[in-house]
């Protein structure tokens, strides 16, 4: 635990990482690949169900590709600071399903899964975007509760350092708490002890089910998407700035429409994520960009540069959610009104050829 580090060593470490950020000398790691190195197949249908997200509004109507969950008396969709997806692809008429990220609260997320008719018996694979608790916090509870339903030996795809211990260093003033906050740690041994999943660590673009690819480590190419200086990772006895080099996003190729890029938090930067998806597939046309864009608390100039670069990609749909932040969400709505869709928990996005 952190008590193993003395305060002086910690301050030295965080000061050094802060200096790296200020100098703009952000690690350029992640995948370096040839343009079009992954021949991603086209899907005839893609359905992305948002099991939970930060926001729910039962009066939002269906809109374009978004089909809303409408509550009836005695039911309610749960929302939280977490994110969970259930995703279906279809190639040559054959359906495939997987889950990606799991939210926080088992009672709420579990109820949502019932209301949304999520059938875990159909799930062929599991994935985790990165090692923050609002994305994996509910995983073990789901595995335990569905022990007899989830197929034994199902692959659980993770990126590098998913199982590392993470922290946040909150400044005094803006929040209810300040100082060093323990963001906990997903334990590999605890998952393996359940005897349900087979853990598969990925660094390169990886097929998760037919028609769905993990990005692998995302290449960093923009100058302004530098991550957050308050997010830290513990490596041995050392505390480092967390650059989330193993963070995973999802890429699909909808027949006749182009790429659908799905992030969870986009600590790597949503523009970096989209550019990486274009490079890995060799497909420039982007149909939709969906997910958390990690712009909550970002400086206005970073939000504006992000929007400018996303507008240049010309997606048909832009769906910011989770950690995008109010200021960035409203800016996307204002500057990309024809493409913008507000997300609500329980929404299904249906893309067809």
Image (tube, grey):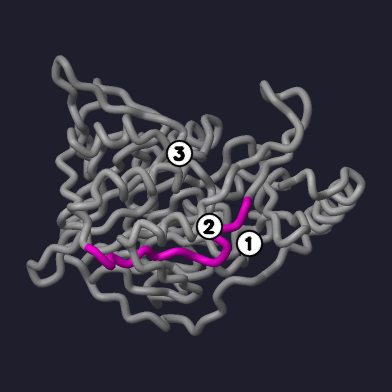
Count of numbered badges drawn on the protein: 3
Residue at 68% x, 39% y: name it. Answer: 299
Q: Which residues lie in the magenta part?
A: 152-165
Q: Are marks 2 and 3 in contact (CB under 8 Å)?
A: no
Q: Which residue is mark 2?
A: 271
Q: Which residue is mark 3?
A: 322
Spatial CA distance of label 1 from label 2 is 7 Å
Say whether residue 153 is magenta. yes
Q: Which of pointers 1 and 3 indicates the residue nearer the eye?
A: 3
The quadrant where residue 161 appears: bottom right
Say whether residue 58 is magenta. no
Q: Which residue is mark 1?
A: 222
Q: Is residue 185 left or right of residue 128?
A: right
Query: In the displayed image of the protein, which residue is found farthest to the front?
Result: 193
Quarter of the picture containing the C terminus is: bottom left
Q: Are marks 1 and 2 in contact (CB under 8 Å)?
A: yes
For mark 3, give the secondary structure: helix
Badge 1: few (under 14), some or many (20 or more) residues near its Cα, within 10 Å?
some
Image spot of residue 124 (x, y percent): 22, 63
Please tell me which residue lies in front, 277 or 94: 94
Image spot of residue 227 (x, y percent): 65, 52
First along the sequence among labels 1 and 3: 1
First along the sequence among labels 2 and 3: 2
Please tell me which residue lies in front, 118 or 284: 118
* Residue 344 in view (yes/no): no
């Amino acid at each position: 635990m952190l008590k193993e580090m003395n305060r002086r060593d910690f301050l030295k470490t965080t000061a050094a990482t802060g200096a790296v950020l200020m100098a703009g000398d952000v690690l350029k790691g992640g995948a370096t690949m040839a343009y079009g190195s992954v021949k991603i197949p086209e899907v005839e249908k893609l359905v992305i169900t948002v099991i939970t997200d930060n926001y729910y509004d039962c009066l939002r109507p269906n809109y374009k590709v978004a089909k809303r969950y409408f509550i009836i008396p005695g039911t309610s969709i749960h929302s939280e600071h977490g994110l969970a997806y259930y995703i279906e692809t279809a190639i040559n008429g054959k359906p495939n399903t997987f889950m990606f990220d799991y939210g926080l609260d088992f009672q709420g997320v579990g109820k949502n899964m019932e209301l949304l008719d999520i059938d875990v018996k159909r799930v062929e694979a599991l994935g985790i975007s990165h090692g923050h608790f609002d994305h994996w916090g509910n995983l073990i509870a789901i595995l335990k509760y569905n022990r007899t339903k989830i197929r034994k030996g199902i692959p659980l795809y993770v990126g590098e350092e998913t199982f590392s211990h993470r922290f946040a260093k909150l400044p005094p003033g803006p929040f209810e708490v300040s100082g060093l906050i323990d963001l906990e740690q997903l334990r590999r041994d605890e998952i393996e002890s359940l005897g349900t999943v087979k853990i598969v660590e990925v660094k390169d673009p990886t097929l998760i089910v037919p028609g769905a690819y993990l990005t692998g480590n995302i290449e960093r190419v923009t100058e302004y998407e530098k991550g957050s200086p308050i997010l830290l990772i513990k490596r041995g006895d050392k505390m480092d700035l967390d650059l989330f080099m193993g963070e995973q996003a999802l890429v699909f190729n909808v027949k006749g429409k182009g790429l659908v890029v799905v992030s969870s938090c986009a600590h790597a930067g949503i523009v970096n994520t989209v550019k990486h998806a274009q490079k890995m597939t060799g497909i420039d046309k982007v149909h939709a960009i969906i997910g958390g864009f990690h712009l909550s608390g970002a400086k206005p100039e970073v939000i504006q540069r992000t929007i400018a670069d996303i507008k240049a990609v010309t997606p048909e749909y832009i769906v910011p959610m989770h950690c995008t932040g109010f200021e960035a969400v409203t800016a996307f709505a204002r500057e990309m009104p024809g493409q913008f869709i507000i997300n609500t928990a329980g929404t299904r996005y249906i893309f067809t050829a």
